[in-house]
Amino acid sequence: MAERVFITGIGMITAIGDNVAGNLRNLKAQQSGLGYSQYVDTIHKNVLPVAEVKHPSESLFALAGIPEKEGFTRTTLLGLAAMREALKDAGITDVQSAPTGFINASTVGGMCDTEKLYFDIIDPEKTGSFLQYIDTLDCADCTQRIADIVGFNEHIATISTACSSSANALMFGARMIKQGMLPRVVCGGTEALTRFTLNGFNSLKNVDKQFCRPFDQQRTGLNLGEGAAYLVLESESFAKANGSRILAELSGYCNTNEAFHPTSPSPDGDGAYEAMKAALAMSGRSLEEVSYINVHGTATLNNDISEGKALERLFGDKVPLFSSTKPFTGHTLAAAGAIEAIYAILAIQHGMIFPNLHFTERMEELNISPVTELIADYPVKNVISNSFGFGGNNASLVISKYEG
Amino acid sequence: MAAISPQPTFDGDILSAPLIHTDRNLLACIEPDYKPFIPGNSLRRMSRVLKMGLAAALKCTADSGLDTPGPIITGTGKGSLQDTEKFIKEIVEYKETALNPTPFIQSTYNSVNGLIALQQKCTAYNNTFVHRGFSFENALLDSIMLIQDGEPHTLTGAFEEITTEHFYIKSRIGFWKNESINSADLCQHLSPGSIAGEGATFFTLTGTPSAHSYAAISGFRMLYKPTKEKLNAALKAMSIQPDLIISGRNGDSNYEHFYKELDSCYPGIPQLGFKHLCGEYDTASAFGLWLAAQIIKTQQIAEQWFPQQQPLTTPVNSILFYNHFYGEQHVMLLLERV
Amino acid sequence: MEELKKKLKEQIIEALNLQDTKPEDIDDNAPLFGEGLGLDSIDSLELMVLLERQYHIKVEDPREGRKILQSVESMAEFIQSKQPA
């Protein structure tokens, strides 16, 4: 029998908070992190809303717990800030005290900084301290800098499957634990806003000029966000022997590919349906036992139809309470899966369902609509967290209340 | 298996293939005719590394004799550099307006995986690792874990390209040799830096051997920035006495000491390098593994690729493979004859 | 109008890299998407970029785009309607 996998520490930074407590406070206050960019150099900064972490990179060094120096991208700093909190929360002072893996996720690595320097980097006439950033573009850079500072020296990896990246990082870490390869793995992702991704999504014509409205008839697209989140996963036997405080169980997960289109989901949500169904089957929970679904809910025309159809197909006329928290954090791409996994844990811990902000009108294609006001004192036992991405990469996680 | 590389590895008989070499310090792939593999309507939009990756994946599936690829797991250090560079430049050139989405979509690291799944209508597990010299290695680990969990087979591979611009960028931080050398002499030419390369290599991995099997992976270890002692112990633990060693020796004097450690662990065992064939890149291990599997299956070494090597007189039942990427990510594999 | 349509066909072939297609192969009224040339939603975005780069016409709403991009004929009509008289 493979080991159960428990979550024993969480850490995060997003547009609505520098740590888990800050995020919870703003989720409860129904306070969105969307606004206009202070730090991305783009002509869209006053036109396309984003959910930016409210610190310039220079002041992120303090949160990351390191002195200011060249070569540390915003991606790395956000990641380090979240990592510090996750380790502290799990009571880990030395990651080498037990074999500990680190599975990170990123979609564009250090693009946030390299895009500003790229033309200097390729210009033989130019030289200077910017060359410290020359090798920070790839996704491994942030992973290795975080690993080296914190001291991870067992297994490290970086996953990039677009918007499902950190959900896949959690899955990969959990599988390593179940295989008995490692007793403890820290998993998650980090993503900084970039001109590159903002223009990329804008070229696909799926960025909303208003604050995004998931599952709303009038939605026209997503808003990008940035942030980082990490979860400490431990095997049941290690957690018990170590006396770890158990926050929740990662009871099920599934990764499927839709094989439908490079950027669009299928209209009936085949991939989303399969991912949720198989993750739930693995968790051993029934449809009725699902208390809440934190949907991918990007507010693009296609995602919400497809995901909504998948919910109706799977749950029939008994679709559980669901909401997208993207109007709080924006779509944080590689970090989204881990951020929303933490929100699932918060929902379980505090007995709350977080609202889907900016919703007014049900989509004509669907019979369901999301939760629009904060629901408190609601027992939450099992949460499905969805992350679906480009390339047809779909991932669903099931996070369950720990009851011994 | 299938490999697109700077050598004629995709089509024809490898044992009689000539040794392609260069004095530009950059070994570029010999690209096949993609039309037999990819429909024209898909091909027209695809950039170079997408075509290389997809064609190698499709040929690999055909070579395996299986109908569907099953789970698809890949590794790439840099993804489509051509598309990334193009989109960065178009953002500036067109002042962030009227941008074509294609280079953005294709710069996404998992775009090759998406295309493989799409073309083969494969809805199984799908994952992409992007971690320099641990990209292909993590893909391999993920695949082995899936097989241990009961998947009958996986499609596992790696793809990488080098562009002129990226070659220049990496030259600024000492990745390549300052002096031009004949790539054929790479392993003997010791000086700072190596030569650049690229490739797309795919494998079908199965849980049980068949007539199609090339080799069995019986040992696998990854080490991140190991100490000398840790590397030494891990290398020694891989095998008692392999028949042959294939190493990632790349003529880079900055990191040669790791290969010296290998030599000291296995004195007297014949050793082949492979970077003179494919150059240095994040996922070169995949090409090295392809070569090792070829040798163990055919029990022959292509003479023109390894002119210094004496013909084999005893059977090669096991091959120890060791590679590292600029001293940071180290991988060792033990291959055995099926 | 004929001149515009001929030029448009050449521009479409170049923008979408339709290697085996010649301008005379494209019927003015044939659907560009699905059955006709077999183009998809990414091509439609690229054709909107073509309109913006070559004719300085910006199409904001993808749903409006679908109507304009039905055929070479509809594209040409749209361009002409936007040109100063």
Image: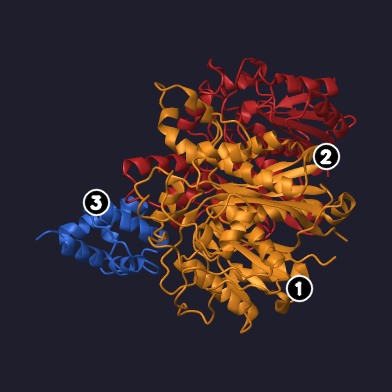
Chain colours: A orange, B red, C blue
Mark 1–mark 3 distance (CA, rounded to whole Å)? 56 Å
Q: Are marks 3 and 2 in contact (CB under 8 Å)?
A: no
Question: Which residue does the numbered mark 3 point to in the structure image?
Answer: C54
> SS of the residue at dot 1?
loop
Residue at the outermost bottom position = A317
Instruction: Tell me, for residue B180, which label it has, or none.
Output: none
In the image, A276 versus B47, the foreground residue is A276
User: Above or below — where is B195 with respect to B330?
Assistant: above
Is A115 placed left or right of B202 in the picture?
left
Does C58 sit left or right of B53 as displayed? left
Residue A238 appears at what percent x and percent y? 86, 51
| Residue A97, numbered label | 2
Disc 3, SS: helix
Residue B331: give x, y in percent of width and height. 74, 35
- Kind of residue at disc 2: Ser
Q: Residues within 10 Å of mark 2 (few under 14, many from 20)?
A: few
The residue sitting at the left extreme is C85
State the residue at coordinates (50%, 48%): A54
Say what amino acid the circle numbered 1 marks: Arg
Classify residue C2 by image quadrant.
bottom left
